[in-house]
Amino acid sequence: MSTPPVVLTIAGSDCGGGAGIQADLATFASLRVHGTSAVTAVTVQDTTGVHAVHRVPTAVVVDQVRVLLRDLAPHATKSGMFGDAETARAVAALAADGRLPRLVVDPVLVSTSGHALATDDVLAVMRDDLIPHADVVTPNTDEAAALLGCSRAGSLEDQTDQALRLLELGCAAAVITGGLTEGARHDVLATRTGIHVLTGPDLVTSNDHGTGCTFAAAVAAGLAHGRPVERAVGDAGAFVRSCLTAAAGWQLGRGRGPVSHLAPTTTDSRGDSA
Ligand code: PXL
């Protein structure tokens, strides 16, 4: 195998292996990119919930990012959970300096189990200081509503309108994931050139922990492979569906189980054909 592209994730650790840094690195390996990581927070977590959160000092986060940028020159970057607003601000400053290439911002607010992973001031920093430098922002419908200060999209029209409004924050593209209409799930991508509605089946499973992180990490992997954003987003949706399908029968833990990053991927989403 030839030298893979490198992706950097700046995110929190989920010691249960379902979300956060662990989901990002598993996704990167599955999609044939080399994953590097700067840890922002350590969550004490299992499938039943988040039991504690320990932030990593901002200087330690920045130091991890600094050495990785210098030595491994990532082709794409991804942000997830921040330990606090100071860390979010420091990462936004790196983005403003053009140091974070092909930046995918996953505006993480709440864990799958319902635990708040960001305070209002982290949300404000993401919206005002970080997202203006993002190539793609990947909120679910709740996160999009929080960023825009409105209620959750209740129709495909609302979802489209909100994706367009996210562009006004200054990002190059925004995809709102997980809009539901009977039996179907829609991801709505808005770019400077148009709207793309990506529709798939609504896969009902309790093993869905880490889908948001996995989606955003897969988008970053696609961008690192040099794909255009429309293709990276479409492939990421297909990858998440294969991860959900493969884990549907798993029995891991007593709560919301993880998606499977062990799913065989199509050559398309894995990047053997580019
Ligand atoms: O899926 C959001 C998320 C992000 N980062 C960490 C998490 C979670 C959800 O549980 O634990 C560390």
Image (cartoon, rainbow, N blue to C red):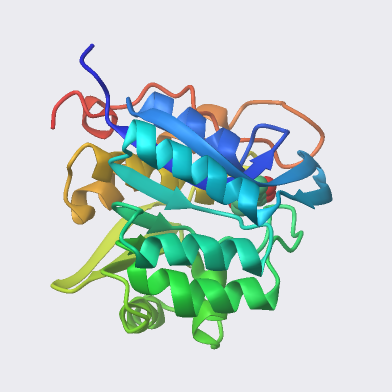
Vertical side of 139 occupied by 237: above or below: above
| Coordinates of residue 143 in the picture (x, y in percent) | 55, 70
Question: Is residue 79 in sight in this rendering?
Answer: yes
Q: Which sits in the foreground, 21 or 166?
A: 21
Q: Which sits in the foreground, 114 or 27?
A: 27
Q: Is residue 215 left or right of residue 157?
A: right
Furthest residue to the right?
A: 51
Q: Who's the residue at 42% across and 43% down the image?
A: 217
| Coordinates of residue 121 in the picture (x, y in percent) | 65, 77
Q: Is residue 16 left or right of residue 243?
A: right
Q: Which sits in the foreground, 50 or 130?
A: 130
Q: Which sits in the foreground, 12 or 45?
A: 12
| Coordinates of residue 73 in the picture (x, y in percent) | 31, 37
Q: Who's the residue at 68% across and 36% down the image?
A: 257
Quarter of the image that includes the N terminus: top left
**Marker count (numbered):** 0
The answer to which quarter of the image holds residue 208 is top right
| Coordinates of residue 222 in the picture (x, y in percent) | 27, 41
Quarter of the image that includes the C terminus: top left
The answer to which quarter of the image holds residue 125 is bottom right
Q: Who's the residue at 76% across and 39% down the image?
A: 47
Vertical side of 162 occupied by 244: above or below: above
Question: Is residue 214 in sight in this rendering?
Answer: no
Vertical side of 11 occupied by 126: above or below: below
Q: Who's the residue at 59% across and 74% down the image?
A: 123
Q: Is residue 151 left or right of residue 84?
A: left
